[in-house]
Amino acid sequence: MLDLAGWSVQDMKGLDFTASRGVAIREFPLKAGFADYMLFVDRQAVGIVEAKKEGTSLGGVDTQSRKYLDGLPPHVQRIGTPLPFAYESTGLETMFRDVRDPDYRSRRLFSFYRPETLMGWAREPETLRARLKDMPPLVTAGLRECQVEAIEGLEHSLSENRPRSLIQMATGSGKTFTAVSFAYRLIKHARAERVLFLVDRANLGRQTLKTLLP
């Protein structure tokens, strides 16, 4: 999985940082023990992977991996202290967290992020979840009261680290315009890179495009 995500997986013996921008070093020695994989991007440590056997429950493994984020020897170059990124993985199940997030917690992934993705996040002064807690006031001109309530409710939910929310609005109340307005604020103010907009009928997709491109 690491190899497919663009990481060069190596042992300490014969280590070659020129092999790839991202290098995952097996059994990396730390003050608290050995990290299963230490992740380096551009020769700087950015995170760790705690690997477990297939079938192992990952509940509680984050406690073990957390101590490795602080345990680098002083001579090792790093993006920061503690390291920002931690994975726990069995190969079938993979969890990830960014400890710079407000009230950070692990979330399930399909695979590992690429080295350039982690480095891009590491260089940002704030994480996406931190930016979601500091959204500017909504400009309500041109919005209906129910649309204002929906957008502000969504942003409040996200600011409290509750990523799953439901908007329930009557037919003809402007759900598409509400969704587009909210997506615009995510991109402009939270600097979200992608917004996935799903519809269950083709005419709803066409309606959304007309809203975006009148």
Image (spheres, helix red, strand yellow):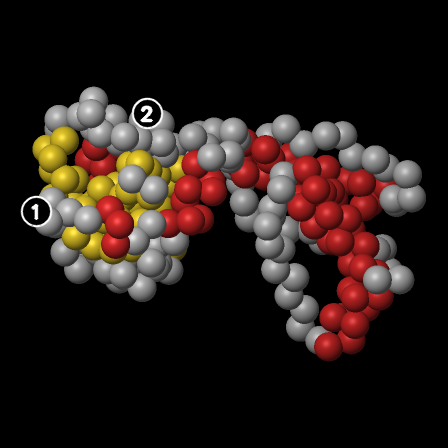
Residue 204 rendering spot, x and y as whole percentages: 76, 70
Q: Is residue 165 above or below residue 132?
A: below
Question: Quick one: which residue is furthest to the front in this view?
Answer: 18
Q: Is residue 173 visible?
A: yes
Q: Is residue 185 above or below residue 94?
A: above
At label 2, the amino acid type is Thr
Q: Which quarter of the rendered picture does the C terminus lie within? A: bottom right
Q: Is residue 49 visible?
A: no
193 displayed left or right of 151: left
Q: Which residue is mark 2?
A: 81
Residue 30 rendering spot, x and y as whole percentages: 14, 31
**Which residue is painted at 55% across and 48% down in the image?**
164
Question: Marks 1/2: CA distance?
Answer: 25 Å
Which mark is drawn over residue 92?
none
Q: Secondary structure at mark 1?
A: loop
8 displayed left or right of 107: left
Q: Quadrant of residue 63?
A: top left
Q: Which residue is mark 1?
A: 13
**Which residue is painted at 81% across and 46% down in the image?**
147
Question: Quick one: which residue is furthest to the right in this view?
Answer: 142
Q: Nearer the viewer, residue 48 or 57?
A: 48
6 displayed left or right of 128: left
Q: Which quarter of the rendered picture does the N terminus lie within? A: bottom left
Q: Is residue 106 above or below residue 135?
A: below
Mark earlier in primary sequence (1, 2): 1
**Which residue is painted at 22% across and 29% down in the image?**
76
At label 1, the amino acid type is Lys
**Which residue is painted at 25% across and 26% down in the image?**
70
Q: Are marks 1 and 2 in contact (CB under 8 Å)?
A: no
Q: Secondary structure at mark 2?
A: loop
Front disc: 1 or 2 = 1
Classed neighbour count for the residue bearing mark 2: other residues with Cα under 10 Å, few (<14), some (14–19), many (≥20): few
